[in-house]
Image: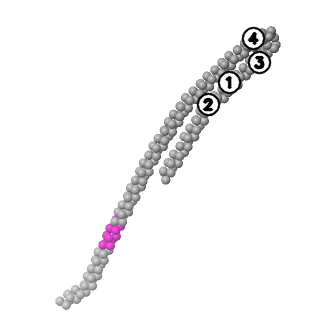
Amino acid sequence: MGGIANVALQALPVISSAQRVVNGFSSASDARKAAEAEARQRAEELEFERQKEANRQRELADQKRHAEEVLRETHALQTRRLLQDQEAAAEAQRADIETRRAQIQASAEADEAARRDALRRAVGRTRTSLGTRGGGTSDGSGEAVLLGLVNRTDADSRNAQAVERLRGQALSQESEDTRRRNLLDQSQLAERQRLELFGNAY
């Protein structure tokens, strides 16, 4: 019995050491598992945050895209309205200019007819006056008087035609000024819209 007891006593330190080793392995395994669990939880939390940020970015991108679409539609409507208003105003101006041009031409034709009628009357009176005084239109003085009447009438006609041309040019210039002003308005609107789109992108 004593021998067995001695062997048992000698085996106790070995058993105790083995137990500590086993316990150490168990503790290390638990620690590793805890670390792995913590790492997985952290990874899940990071993935959740990443997905959350990705969703937020998508929502912002969708909102910005929608805002840009609305802005472009608004710009298109503004441009259509401007062009429609300009075309309506231009059409009204064309009608007004054609009316005034016709009035100018009619007035010029009436004035020319009046000048020619006045010339005929003046020539008739002059011939009568020269005949009454015993002269005629065949001599130099009579021809000079008649030629003076014709020349004055022709000069008046040329002056009237020059004024008529100036009035016509003024009407044409009105149309050109309107065309240039419309192009400027269109250019300014396009520039404002471009700046709005640029500002909306940031």
The prevailing secondary structure element of the residues shown in magenta is helix
Q: Name the residue under label 1.
A: 161
Toward which corner of the image does residue 184 lie, by quadrant?
top right
> Marks 2 and 1: in contact by CB < 8 Å?
no
Q: Is residue 55 above or below residue 110?
A: below
Q: Mark 3 points at which residue?
A: 148
Q: Which of 196 and 103 is in front in this view?
A: 103
SS at badge 3: helix
Q: Could you tell me the amino acid type at mark 2?
A: Leu
Q: Is residue 24 left or right of residue 154?
A: left
Between disc 4 and disc 3, the foreground one is 4
Asked if residue 143 shows in the view, the reply is yes
Q: Nearer the viewer, residue 118 or 162?
A: 118
Q: Earlier in the sequence, mark 1 or mark 4?
A: 4
Please tell me how crowded label 4 is: few (under 14), some (14-19), or many (20+) other residues with Cα within 10 Å. Answer: some
Asked if residue 138 shows in the view, the reply is no
Q: Mark 4 points at which residue?
A: 128
Q: Earlier in the sequence, mark 3 or mark 1?
A: 3
Residue 14 locus on image (x, y percent): 27, 83
Q: Is residue 82 left or right of residue 50?
A: right
Between disc 3 and disc 1, the foreground one is 3
